[in-house]
Image (cartoon, rainbow, N blue to C red):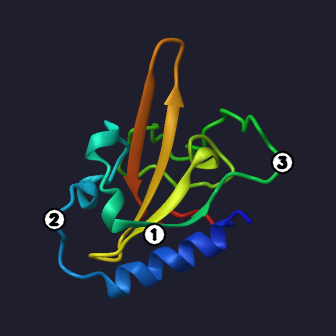
């Protein structure tokens, strides 16, 4: 069952309140989308807590949500679960520091690009 915006915001707020000091992984620095190779993904310390992908939709929309002129790669871009790229994300929690991270994979004609972004509860559009 996919998480809705309200559930994501609650998870993010709880994570921010209980977050430990920064752990050894690099994901705490992903305020905006960051590309990574699979060997950099700290799978041993991340727990999948849900998805933002809607049930029954194989190809989610590519429409982005930027009502205040932000861009895809803006640190302050809103997190709207109904819009790209959030509608293609899985949600993970770091077991070391409790922070939430979104992950999705961009598939181009000749490449695969894994991307991650830390969830800032104040940016989740509920």
Please report whichever mark, 3 or 1, sits nearer to the chain's N-terminal start.
3
Q: Nearer the viewer, residue 28 or 111?
A: 111
Q: Residues within 10 Å of mark 1 (few under 14, many from 20)?
A: few
- The quarter in which the C terminus is drawn is bottom right
Q: Which mark is residue 77?
A: none
- Could you say whether the residue bearing mark 1 is in a helix, strand or loop? helix
- Could you say whether the residue bearing mark 3 is in a helix, strand or loop? loop
Q: Residue at x 31, y 36 (%)?
A: 37
Q: Which mark is residue 24?
A: 2
Query: Where is mark 1, residue-wise?
Result: 122
Distance in Å between CA atoms under marks 2 and 3: 37 Å
Please report whichever mark, 1 or 2, sits nearer to the chain's N-terminal start.
2
- Could you say whether the residue bearing mark 2 is in a helix, strand or loop? loop
Left or right side of 24 for 97: right
Q: Residue at x 60, y 40 (%)?
A: 84
Q: Residue 9: where, in percent of width, then height?
A: 55, 73
The mark lying in front, picked from 3 and 1, is 3
Q: Residue 79: where, in percent of width, then height?
A: 53, 55
Marks 2 and 3 close (CB-CB < 8 Å): no
Distance in Å between CA atoms under marks 1 and 2: 24 Å
Q: Residue at x 56, y 50 (%)?
A: 89
Q: Residue furthest bottom?
A: 18
Which picture quadrant has residue 18? bottom left
Q: Which mark is residue 56?
A: 3
Which picture quadrant has residue 22? bottom left
Q: Residue furthest top?
A: 110
Left or right side of 61 for 73: left
């Amino acid at each position: 069952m996919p998480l809705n915006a309200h559930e994501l915001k609650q998870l993010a707020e709880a994570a921010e309140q209980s977050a430990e000091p920064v752990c050894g992984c690099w994901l705490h620095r992903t305020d905006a989308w960051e590309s990574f190779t699979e060997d950099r993904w700290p799978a041993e310390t991340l727990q999948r807590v849900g998805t933002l992908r809607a049930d029954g939709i194989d190809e989610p929309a590519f429409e982005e949500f930027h009502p205040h002129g932000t861009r895809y790669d803006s640190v302050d871009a809103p997190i709207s679960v109904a819009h790209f790229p959030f509608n293609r994300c899985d949600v993970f929690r770091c077991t070391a520091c409790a922070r939430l991270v979104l992950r999705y994979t961009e598939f181009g004609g000749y490449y695969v690009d894994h991307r991650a972004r830390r969830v800032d509860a104040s940016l989740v559009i509920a």
